[in-house]
Image (cartoon, rainbow, N blue to C red):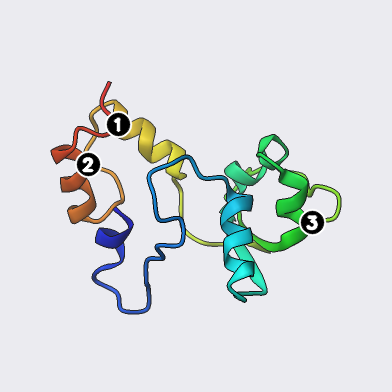
Amino acid sequence: MAQLACAADPRFEVSRIEGSSALSYTILTIEKLTARGIGPLSFLIGADAFKDIRSWYRWKDVVASVEFIVVTRPGAVWETPPGAVVHELAGLQLPESSSDIRTQLTRGDSAVPVPESVLRYIREHGLYAL
């Protein structure tokens, strides 16, 4: 789906660093990137996901390894974990989170803000269906 979403814009390239369908944790991806000499790393994340960072696998290592760019929405509430470097990106017109979009898709709503090619893929593969 990432390839489909990025296909129309040459500024984006989909990474294959994770390379498998196995469960992947953020810290493991960060470690793979830094082992290849890629960095420093910034992690772009929505405030809704960032507020739960302390529940992530090895979250303290994640916090120590990257700087966060937290995309906020009106009314978003989150706290900066100890040691985290956070840059807030406010004012984007992104009223829905990825969680909201998945919920809409689960309900069968197809009026979601994703590229048509991605929506077609979701339908063809029966993703997010009840």
Image quadrant in which you'd find residue 129: top left
Percent x, y of residue 68? 67, 60
Please give left or right for residue 69 compared with residue 99 in the image. right
Task: Give the Cα separation between the discs numbered 1 and 2.
Answer: 8 Å
Residue count near mark 1 (Cα–Cα under 10 Å), binned few <14, some 14–19, many ≥20: some
What residue lies at 59% left-to-right and 48% top-to-bottom?
A: 74
Q: Is residue 108 visible?
A: yes
**Residue under numbered circle 1:** 128
Amino acid type indicated by mark 1: Tyr
Which residue carries the number 2 mark?
122
Can you give x and y, in whole percent of width and height, for residue 47 in the image?
61, 48
**Residue drawn at point x = 60 percent, y = 52 percent:** 28
Whichever of labels 1 and 2 marks the residue nearer the N terminus, that label is 2
**Which residue type carries mark 3?**
Ala
Residue 5 or residue 33, whichever sits in front: 33
Look at label 2 and name its amino acid. Ile
Left or right? Give the position of 18 relative to 91. left
Res 56 → quadrant: top right
Q: Mark 3 = which residue?
A: 84
129 versus 64 height, above or below: above
Q: Are marks 1 and 2 in contact (CB under 8 Å)?
A: yes
Q: Residue furthest bottom?
A: 10
